[in-house]
Amino acid sequence: MNATEKFIAPVRDRLNPLEKFMKMIFGIEPEVLYSYNTWQYPDYNKYEHAIFNVEDKARQKKEQFPKDCEKAFELGKKMAQ
């Protein structure tokens, strides 16, 4: 998602009511992965982006996004089993 984790934290419980529904139906807590502060455009110079800190987004893309992708891959493997 484009928002930062800090921005989402106050509304996290209301973000996805499907999680609670899935727990109710299946009786287990669903595994969820949120990828925060994602890189949205190939070239931020082409867009008005005053509300974004491009340096933070670049750092997130370089340092955290590969970890999020690995977590997503591992979740996919678990689902396939």
Image (tube, rainbow, N blue to C red):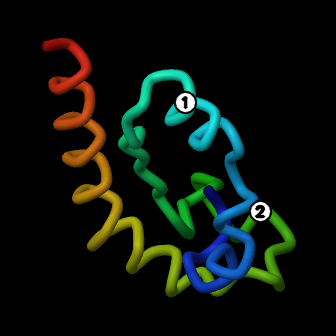
Check residue 58 in the rendering and tell me which mark sits there, or answer none: none
- Total labels: the figure holds 2
Mark 2: which amino acid? Lys
Mark 2: few/some/many CA within 10 Å (<14, 14-19, 20+): few
| Vertical comparison of 72 with 62: above or below | above
Q: Nearer the viewer, residue 29 or 10?
A: 29
Indicate the secondary structure of the residue bearing disc 1: helix
| The N terminus, quarter of image | bottom right
Indicate the secondary structure of the residue bearing disc 2: helix
> Furthest residue to the top?
80
Check residue 46 in the rendering and tell me which mark sits there, or answer none: 2
- Residue 40 percent coordinates (x, y): 63, 55
| Vertical comparison of 4 with 79: above or below | below
The residue located at (41%, 74%) in the rendering is 60
Mark 1: which amino acid? Met
The answer to the question of whether label 1 and label 2 lie on touching residues, with beta carbons closer than 8 A, is no
- Residue 51 percent coordinates (x, y): 81, 83
Residue 58 lies left or right of residue 39; in this view the side is left
Q: Nearer the viewer, residue 62 or 69?
A: 69
Check residue 22 in the rendering and tell me which mark sits there, or answer none: 1
Residue 7 lies left or right of residue 60; in this view the side is right
| Vertical comparison of 80 with 74: above or below | above
Query: Rounded to the nearest whole Å, what is the CA distance between mark 1 and mark 2?
Result: 41 Å
Mark 1: few/some/many CA within 10 Å (<14, 14-19, 20+): few
Residue 33 lies left or right of residue 67; in this view the side is right
- Residue 62 percent coordinates (x, y): 31, 69
For residue 41, which quarter of the picture? bottom right
The residue located at (65%, 67%) in the rendering is 12
Q: Nearer the viewer, residue 20 or 63?
A: 20
The residue located at (22%, 34%) in the rendering is 73
| Vertical comparison of 36 with 16: above or below | below
